[in-house]
Image: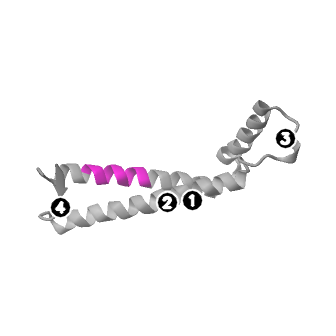
Amino acid sequence: MTLKMEGQPFLLQFAVWACVIVFVVGFFTALYANLLVISRTGVLINRAEDQGLNWGERQGRKFSRFNRFFVGDEFRSLRRLSFGAWTSAAVSFGLLLSLVLLFGERTSP
């Protein structure tokens, strides 16, 4: 079973392509924001003061540094970027999926 959009109105095709573009941009922006969060919080870095600790304590300190992202004022704009990008990607994918399933023509192979 394949889906065709050839016989559909221009407005519907435009909406589908707009959803595709917003999804792709939102997805890659969210990945970039995640990389920024990881680099700015230092969650993957073993610091010098953590060298003498056991594995669990080192992981706890890394998690504590990552939690600063959720509560720290210095990460407010990065939080907005990250959550906005993931939200836009999820909403546009859901809308795209519903548009294709509701209005796409189903043909057998």
User: Is residue 104 shown to the viewer in this render?
Assistant: no
C-alpha separation, residue under disc 2 versus residue under disc 1: 6 Å
Count neighbours of disc 2 (C-alpha within 10 A) and say few if under 14, some if 14 to 19, many if 20 or more. Answer: some
Confirm or deny contact between disc 2 and disc 1 (CB under 8 A).
yes
Q: Amino acid at mark 2?
A: Phe
C-alpha separation, residue under disc 1 versus residue under disc 3: 28 Å
- Of mark 4 and mark 3, the one earlier in the sequence is 4
Which residue occupies the foreground of this view, 4 or 70?
A: 4
C-alpha separation, residue under disc 4 versus residue under disc 3: 57 Å
Q: Amino acid at mark 1?
A: Tyr
The residue shown at (88%, 37%) is: 52
Q: Quadrant of residue 88?
A: bottom left
Q: Amino acid at mark 4?
A: Met
C-alpha separation, residue under disc 3 versus residue under disc 2: 33 Å
Residue 32: image tag? 1
The residue to which callout 3 is attached is: 50
The residue to which callout 2 is attached is: 28
Q: Position of residue 10 (x, y in %)?
A: 18, 68
User: Is residue 79 shown to the viewer in this render?
Assistant: yes
